[in-house]
Amino acid sequence: MADEAAPRLMPVAADRDKDDRRRCAAHCGFAVLGIMSTLLVYGILQILTDAALLKRQKLEIEELRKKLQGSHSEGLEQVVLKLRNDMHKEQMVAEKERELEEGEAQKSPSKIVADSLSQISRSSTFLPNIGVPTTSKTGRSTLLAAQARMQAQFEEKLQAEREEAARMQEELQAQLQAQQAALEENQSLLRQTQEEVKGMHTKFEKTNALLRAVLKLQKD
């Protein structure tokens, strides 16, 4: 009787061993799928983060370009207008304090401004270039000492502002180039991450299909 039962027990043990191997394979498959799912989600989040970073960098580059385009002309124009107003004020003060010659009438504020603009336009071509109107020559042959001093100060300050504007432009240009290089590098990293995520997704699908096949065999 014992000899007859032994052959029956051997197939049962073999079936159990086979089932154990299938269950072990299924558990391993689920574990692998879990890890791959985590990596896949992480990769997708990384892509979203990189995309947001690229968008922000593009906006920063656009802002730098706008600053670079407007920093020179607008900045100098404001400086010139301020210097011009200061000169007008000093010119009016000097004219009021000057002793009038015999038979000479006191100049009106508008005449003082016109004379001041006329003197500036003789030695500087910057005002016409930025659209500041100038007046015709008055025919006056002698300049007051105050006019000469203010004219020299005007040219000195204008040159200093031109140099400062050029320096700022160089700095903005350097920042723009650095941002552009960083943008290109991040774009390359984003493409690399996208390729890696695509590869992980393909492996995930293959592993999932294999696990389904194993589970189907286990049920059968």
Image (cartoon, rainbow, N blue to C red):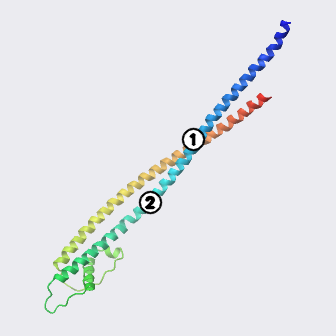
At 24% from the left edge and 70% from the top edge, which residue is drawn?
Answer: 155
**SS at circle 1:** helix
Quadrant where the N terminus is found in the figure = top right
What percent of the width, then of the height, locates residue 153?
Answer: 22, 70
- Residue 23 makes an appearance in the image: yes
**Which one is in front, 105 or 219?**
219
At 77% from the left edge and 31% from the top edge, which residue is drawn?
Answer: 216
- Figure quadrant of residue 33: top right
- Figure quadrant of residue 24: top right
Badge number at residue 63: 2
Total numbered circles = 2
> In the rendered image, which residue does mark 1 sit on?
42
Q: Is residue 58 above or below residue 104?
A: above
Q: Nearer the viewer, mark 1 or mark 2?
A: 1
What percent of the width, then of the height, locates residue 115?
Answer: 25, 82
Quadrant where the C terminus is found in the figure = top right
In this rendering, position of residue 124 left or right of residue 171: left
**SS at circle 2:** helix
The alpha-carbon separation of the residues under discs 1 and 2 comes to 32 Å
In this rendering, position of residue 13 left or right of residue 56: right
**In the rendered structure, which amino acid carries the disc numbered 2?**
Glu
In this rendering, position of residue 52 left or right of residue 75: right
